[in-house]
Image (cartoon, rainbow, N blue to C red):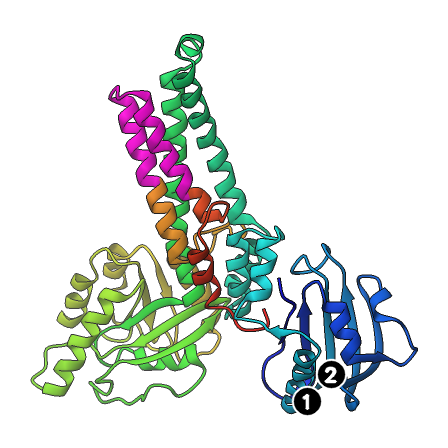
Amino acid sequence: MRTIAAIATPPAEGGIAVIRVSGENAADIAARVFRPVNGRDIKEMRGYTACYGEIFDGDKRLDDGVLLIYRAPHSYTGEDAAEISCHGGIYTAKRVLSACFTAGAVPAQAGEFTKRALLNGKMSLTQAEAVADVISAQNEQFLLCAASQREGALYRRIRAVSDELLSTVTLIQAWIDYPDEMEDEFDGNLEADKLRHIVTELEELLASHGEGQLIRDGIPCAIVGRPNVGKSTLMNLLTGTEKSIVTDIEGTTRDIVEETVMLGGLMLRLADCAGIRETDDVVESIGVERMLKKLGEAAVVLAVFDSSRPLNEDDERLIAKLGNKRTLCIINKTDLDEKADISALEDRFADIVRISAKDPSSLKQLEKAVSDIAGLGDLDLTAGFIANERQRICATEALDHTRKALEALENGVTLDAVGIMCENALDRLYELSGEHVSDTVVDQVFRRFCVGK
């Protein structure tokens, strides 16, 4: 493959910029661009060694910097590689990159360094996908998940299921080829138990997709309640800004105010909704309709009730609308005299927190309560999870084929048919991990990468 080069740091001013070069001619190209001040021969440098020197484009000096050499196979890509660190000006970095092109390198495509790492056996496809997730992580929890994926957590889960399924496929194939010798070796009940276990493992793996999405993209949360219970004050508390207008006038919030916030490592996509009540105001009615729609989309509902006022019909209407939604009942305004029937709320909700949204110390209570209701508090973030739609489709198809194989085995269908179903499931798992995957799929995976990674 040709030797590629790209700027590996963001296109912005900074302390340094790094130009990455990878391929069999990486050291030669570096030697044409970089001149060590101590006169060292770059082509003789060992891996993981560095030197200080000057950077040239032909005979024109561009900058001074540091060169780091990697030797195959002990590099990120598995190839010989070089990294030139120069001063972090945008123009300077582009000039150094241009000098690398003049010296014989070609521009790297999006994700091509990681793609080469995959092709050279340095990582699995799921690990490569996790690299992009590490780069794009916006919260601590997803960074931990992505880092575990990068270390092979998902790959190991897939491999364990694949190996178990492969043993069944191998046994069935042996029975087909040598029926007389294998007549007493094949135990249908035992193989059915193995397939049931595989079904369970794949179901659990697929369930992790929803949890992974919540961690990566943020938990959609709707803040709902009747007018003037303190929804906007709660929104401002969570965002740390005057995001929502707060007044004593009922119906102040007429449209949905949305913001993404971090709460104790959780990323929440908050929506401060219009208060639910019967109204003749056309604009406010539209706000209530939008609130009901947002309520349906929310993964977690923060239902706010005013402890300083008796519960009324609007509160009851809201409770009826909640159904089976994951709901945290927030009893607000606890700094005032209590007039609401709190016992009635305790009968209706399993998860309740008492706060004063005007008190910043309430954030700690909300942090734990929201984490518990979201179901992410006890989640093993290092276990490996389905991180994207490609992986979800592969796992879904593998589960479908395994279920069909189990049903066929239980109903006495011929073993050659059962074997084909198991092989189809195995193919989907191999595609998931990248062991058997088309060039088209690989290209699609790396399109979302940045150039330089």
Q: Considering only vertical position in the picture, is 126 above or below 195?
A: below
- In three-dimensional space, the C-alpha distance between marks 2 and 1, rounded to whole angstroms, equals 8 Å
Left or right relative to 111: residue 269: left
Q: Residue at x 20, y 70 (%)?
A: 293
Would you place residue 298 above or below residue 160 in this image?
A: below
Residue 292's spot in the image, x, y percent? Answer: 19, 71
Q: Is residue 103 left or right of residue 203?
A: right
Residue at 57%, 58% in the rendered image: 147
For label 2, the crowd category at 10 Å Cα-Cα, with few meaning under 14, some 14 to 19 and many 20 or more, is: many
Q: Are marks 2 and 1 in contact (CB under 8 Å)?
A: yes
Magenta segment boundaries in residue numbering: 399-428
Please name the predominant secondary structure of the magenta segment in the image.
helix
Foreground pick, 225 / 177: 177
Give residue 2's quadrant in the image: bottom right
**Residue position marked by numbered label 1 in the rendering:** 92
**Vertical comparison of 175 with 138: above or below:** above
Callout 2 amino acid: Cys
Location of the N terminus (image quadrant): bottom right
Q: Position of residue 161 (x, y in %)?
A: 46, 37
Is residue 276 visible from the viewing direction of this image? no
Q: Which residue is mark 2?
A: 86
